[in-house]
């Protein structure tokens, strides 16, 4: 597969491990990775992964500030092949659902939708209220893919990383970063 340029955004929801492992998987596949971490994404990343955005920045090709609406990705003309917000907070989901492009993450998601580029939102909250559910419906209607942070167990994961990677596998396919999913159901999986 040709090398792609993919934006990964980490916002302030639990599950920052998804963003980190997504970045590592994309780099492992030879893609170019751009990164934006929101203020609360940074806090959650530090709490959950003991990793600072600065340290994570060393693993990617380009880093942008979430407050910089003059950064390249804020324009639909900037070359991006796909975008994932992983994890995606309910606040950022609301911004995307309503076109309230106050941050670089939301503005770039807005551009992804208007330019018809793959956009994956790995949303995380529980329980969900009606506003969250309606916002998910709205972004799906606009063309995004919503992947809730709810991994399957039928492939019998042995570690947290196994569990997380089963969803990363699905995200990569939806971003068109790889041809097909590796963790595939077959009747043998159930034995
Ligand atoms: C440790 C921590 C965990 C959080 N987890 C969630 C979560 O799972 N889902 C969510 O929607 N918000 C969560 N929040 C709240 C968001 O961080 C908050 O709404 C913030 O304004 C989101 O901003 P952002 O989307 O720009 O990152 C969490 C906050 C903290 C500090």
Image: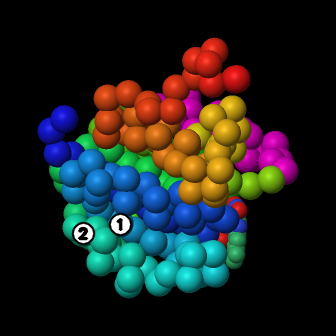
Give the SS element for disc 2.
Answer: strand
- Horizontal side of 117 relative to 135 (left or right) equals left
Residue 43, quarter of the rendered image: bottom right
Q: Residue 136's spot in the image, x, y percent?
A: 64, 40
- Horizontal side of 96 relative to 131 (left or right) equals left
Look at the image and tell me in which quarter the C terminus lies. Answer: top right
Split into quadrants, the picture shows ligand 1 in the one at bottom right
Give the SS element for disc 1.
Answer: strand
In the image, which disc is placed on residue 62?
Answer: 2
Task: Say if mark 2 contacts mark 1, CB within 8 Å.
Answer: yes
Q: Is residue 159 visible?
A: yes
The part of the chain drawn in magenta is: 127-146
Along the polypeptide, which appears first: circle 2 or circle 1?
Answer: 1
> Is disc 1 surrounded by few (<14), some (14 to 19) or many (20+) residues within 10 Å?
many
Mark 1 highlights which residue? 35
Tell me the residue at 45%/71% (across/down).
37
Of all residues shown, which one is farthest toward the front? 191
Residue 65, quarter of the rendered image: bottom left
Image: 166 above or below 46: above
Quick one: 74 or 79, which is closer to the camera? Answer: 79
Tell me the residue at 44%/33% (across/down).
182
Q: Residue 100's spot in the image, x, y percent?
A: 52, 56
Quick one: 185 or 128, which is closer to the camera? Answer: 185
Tell me the residue at 63%/24% (across/down).
189
Q: In whole angstroms, how far apart are the C-alphas of marks 2 and 1?
A: 6 Å
Tell me the residue at 29%/78% (across/down).
58
Q: Residue 74's spot in the image, x, y percent?
A: 31, 60
Q: Residue 143's spot in the image, x, y percent?
A: 47, 31
């Amino acid at each position: 597969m040709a090398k792609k340029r993919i934006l990964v955004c980490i916002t302030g929801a639990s599950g920052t491990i998804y963003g980190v492992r997504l970045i590592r998987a994309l780099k492992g596949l030879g893609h170019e990775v751009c990164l934006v971490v929101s203020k609360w994404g940074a806090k959650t990343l530090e709490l959950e992964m003991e990793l600072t955005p600065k340290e994570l920045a060393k693993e990617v090709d380009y880093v942008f500030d979430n407050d910089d609406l003059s950064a390249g990705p804020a324009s639909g003309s900037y070359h991006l092949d796909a975008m994932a917000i992983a994890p995606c907070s309910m606040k950022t989901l609301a911004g995307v659902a309503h076109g309230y492009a106050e941050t670089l993450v939301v503005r770039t998601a807005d551009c992804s939708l208007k330019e018809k580029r793959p956009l994956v939102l790995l949303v995380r909250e529980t329980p969900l209220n009606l506003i969250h559910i309606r916002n998910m419906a709205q972004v799906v209607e606009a063309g995004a893919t919503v992947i809730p942070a709810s991994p399957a167990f039928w492939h019998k994961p042995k570690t947290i990383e196994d569990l997380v990677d089963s969803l990363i596998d699905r995200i990569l396919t939806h971003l068109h970063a790889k041809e097909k999913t590796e963790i595939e159901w077959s009747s043998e999986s159930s034995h």
